[in-house]
Image (cartoon, rainbow, N blue to C red):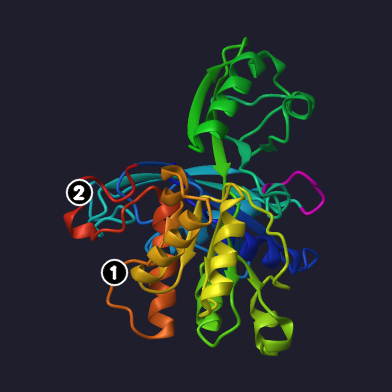
Amino acid sequence: MPFYRIYMKEIKQITEAYQNIDFSKTQAALATVVRVEGSSYRRTGARMLVLESGEWIGGISGGCLEGDALKKARLAMSQNKATLITYDTTDDDPYQIGVGLGCNGIIDVLITPLDPQNPNNAVRQLQSCIDQRTPNLVVTVTGISKAHESIALGNVFRFDNEAHFTEIFPLSQLNESLIPAIKEALNTTKSSSKEYTLENGTKLTLFLEVIPPAIQLYVFGSNYDVYPMVRVAKELGWRVISVCNPAKMHASLSEMADAVVPKDHQPEIDDFTAAISMCHDYETDYRNLQMLLKTNIKYIGLLGPKKRTIKMYDRMNEEGSSLTPQQEERIYSPVGLDIGAATPEEIALSVCAEIRAFFSGRDGNRLKFRPKPIYEN
């Protein structure tokens, strides 16, 4: 499983805040982490919407760079010009922003003033990514050696498909090498920076950023322990669909979940979908397991002890529908990480942590014993 760094919650918060800005009274800019060398609290793709008033939404660090980025953003707004700022926390200079944090990294932050009249400004491009259920890719100009008539620092181009991209991207001379690089990034779900030299000698750096959709979680059941499961998943920014008998659910569930659907609903599965059956009824959970195994979903969680799941496996074998090794790999039961969870809230934490680990390609062990850097795949 590839490592998915999913910032969709932050992107949604930024786009929602952007829609509420009165640009007749104030200005705004978007700060984006576009390169990280070494260690950093936030990674590439972290964003912060900055208002002229000093308010901001999102974040580009653990709080140490935001103040300086605000000052730089105000300057960029006053000049109506994008700028790239480098923060070097490896420097011993005590006057360098970020020194003393112990991060030992170099971070490039692109600050782009937002023109509300430009339908292709950076935030508008992000808005079009939110409801997609396949990975998005945006190409951002993060470096240009000299002024160019058709492209500038901070320009953003969303890749929908090859035909559309070749129409909107102004440098056709790069398409032969850029399009394959975009397709490779989408295939590996790995963002990267690419450097090019144009025919006139202009050096160009493009950040190819893959933006995966939010994790989609189907929660089967309507008992009281479903509610903390939905709350925790929503706090993580996931899309949560509750599958239950509407007559048995509390009204608050429909307020928390993105959707509430009846028990006979056929889930819409994609590569970023997980499901957990927590109905506390053997027959219902068994039917849910059988139904989910007929889909291509990669993560099926079953609440309950291992002996209960083994009973289901034995029953399937007796009914002539024995599990294949590939099917069994998709089933997570008992569901969750072993953190000693006992309450519904703790169980929700355990389950959501395991789901996140699954989509990250991680094993859920303690970072204390991880031999590699935290963010290294």
Residue 106 in the image, given as x and y percentages of width and height: 34, 44
Q: How many marks?
A: 2
**Which residue occupies the foreground of this view, 198 or 148?**
198
**Which residue occupies the foreground of this view, 245 or 196?**
245
Residue at horizontal 70%, vertical 80%?
245
Residue holding disc 2: 92
Apparent side of residue 252 relative to residue 192 in the rendered image (left or right): right
The first of marks 2 and 1 along the sequence is 2
Apparent side of residue 45 relative to residue 91 in the rendered image (left or right): right
The stretch in magenta equals 116-122
Eyeballing the image, is 152 above or below 95?
A: above
In which quadrant of the rendered view does residue 343 lie?
bottom left
The amino acid type found where label 1 is placed reads Asp
Q: Is residue 74 visible?
A: no
Q: Are marks 2 and 1 in contact (CB under 8 Å)?
A: no
Label number found at residue 338: 1
Q: Say what secondary structure mark 2 lies in.
A: loop
Residue 338 in the image, given as x and y percentages of width and height: 28, 69
Name the quadrant of the N terminus. top left
Q: Is residue 361 visible?
A: yes
Q: Say what secondary structure mark 1 lies in.
A: loop
Residue 89 in the image, given as x and y percentages of width and height: 29, 50
Residue at horizontal 52%, vertical 61%?
70
The amino acid type found where label 2 is placed reads Asp
Label 2 and label 1: CA atoms lie apart by: 42 Å
